[in-house]
Amino acid sequence: MWAFIHKLGSPKWFYAISTRLLPWFWAAAAVLLMVGAAWGLAFAPSDYQQGNSFRIIYVHVPAAILAQSCFVALAVAGGIFLVWKIRLADMAATVIAPFGAAMTFLALFSGAVWGVPTWGTWWVWDARLTSMLIQLFLYLGIIALRGAFASRDSGAKAASVLALVGVVNIPIIKYSVEWWNTLHQPATFTLTERPAMPVEMWLPLLVMVLGFYCFFIALTLTRTRSEILRRESAKRWVRELVEGRTGGDTDGL
Amino acid sequence: MQVVEPKTGLAVAVKATVKRDLTLLLRRRGEVLNPLVFFALVITLFPLGISPDTDLLAEIAPGLLWVAALLATQLSLDVLFRGDFDDGSLEQLLLAPQPLPALVLSKVLVHWLLTGLPLAVMAPLLGVMLALPAGSYAVLAVSLALGSASLSLIGAIGAALTVGLARGGVLLSLLVLPLYIPVLIFGAGAVQVAVLGGNAAPHLALLGALLALALMLAPWAIAAALRISING
């Protein structure tokens, strides 16, 4: 068990295994996103109240779910890095943070676009919009803090501490903001209840959510691999890999 | 022959830290007064920027007072560890045999005593200037006293993370202000409820709960952040 975890933490091993996994995740992401988008945007029935404008949930909901998952992933990676000093966790955290920020922005933006036909305004100070906005600021703070340190190791540790502080605070922020004001409809998906939407509507949504997750995993793997190559550029296996590549041997890439 | 051991208990260390910080800060009174002057100035700006109409001001006074007090606390954070970092006494604190979370907690306590508490005492005075309705002054002071303690604790995490950076000021606001939002909501909410004649106790209880949580978790985060800032 421990040997496996140590192996998993080794950049070289991770690079090798991700080479094999990566095409599968990219393929799954492409298929799921295309199927979900076509199904949701063209074939799902339109809403009896909101008409076709409801279709933006096929982007909005997956983005919002990913925005929150990314923060948890960021905090878990930060915790692993702080406790076990596994550098790979920090490399993953480095690439997850901008992706999470982008997803948070996408959720906010698509929400605003959807708000115009539905609520008649681009922005309302509603609980979930506001807590999403605060989450965006938390992401930006983590990214900025990492960049502010001259030494990469200090920046990584500081960003990990802040991610952990943030993940403790997010539920508190969420509930306090909800207490403060609520206009947003309740969550579309919960694990405990059957969705109120008809099957034709939520199935494409589920496909889109899975597609977003596959896309997230594929992108994180790809970017972590480049991060490994950059940080470990002095290691022999990286040199051999890169030199082998320039020499015309593309095996394993 | 009896050997007299030097006193190294936790209580002694905490008392010494509190005394040292209090002495240092009281010798630089200007630094203690700055947040209070800032608080008064910001509150003066709002009627000039919005309207001198007392009805309107009374309605928005709870929020204005809380936001201004929060910003005043935030601005005072940068000096919390800066002086000790510059003269090396922060390293001594890290090397001390006593647990670091307890020692930083005593530093934060001093910060609250000389920033949060004076702000809470001063707030009712500014409330009068904003025509805050009678009957909400006690709640305003109590909510600020409770809330600013949480603000000091949460803010100290950010201050500890940025103390090693040459220009951490703006970054500190970016890190700390989002984390202040729950305290702001319940603090301003308590005053709002008191203005409307309701019972502010639930809001105050929630502020107390936030403080309890911050007291429990923040010292460890501050200590970890200080170790990162010093050791890299």
Image (spheres, coloured by chain):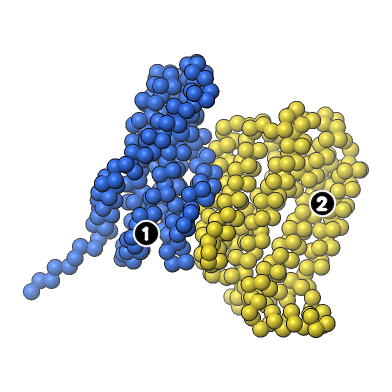
Amino acid found under the numbered disc labelled 1: Asp
Q: Nearer the viewer, mark 1 or mark 2?
A: 1
Q: Position of residue A23 (x, y in %)?
A: 82, 68
Question: Which hue is chain B drawn in?
Answer: blue
The residues tagged by marks 1 and 2 sit, at their Cα atoms, a distance apart of 55 Å
Left or right of A156: which side holds B29? left
Nearest the viewer among A14 and B84 is B84
Q: Is residue A47 above or below residue B231?
A: above
Inspect this view and state whether residue B149 appears.
Answer: yes
Amino acid found under the numbered disc labelled 2: Val
* Mark 2 secondary-structure assignment: helix
Question: Which hue is chain A drawn in?
Answer: yellow
Left or right of A98: which side holds B101? left
Quarter of the image with the C terminus of chain A is bottom right
Residue indicated by mark 2: A207
Q: Position of residue A63 (x, y in %)?
A: 73, 48
The structure residue drawn at horizontal position 67% and vertical position 53%, both measured from the top left corner, is A100
Q: How many marks?
A: 2
Q: Is residue A221 above or below residue B161?
A: below
Q: Are marks 1 and 2 on the same chain?
A: no
The structure residue drawn at horizontal position 55% and vertical position 63%, both measured from the top left corner, is A156
Nearest the viewer among A89 and B54 is B54
* Mark 1 secondary-structure assignment: helix
Q: Position of residue A223 (x, y in %)?
A: 71, 65
- Residue at mark 1: chain: B
Quarter of the image with the N terminus of chain A is bottom right
Image marks 1 and 2: residues in contact by CB distance under 8 Å: no
Nearest the viewer among B98 and A186 is B98
Mark 1 crowd level (few <14, some 14–19, many ≥20, 10 Å Cα): few
Residue indicated by mark 1: B86
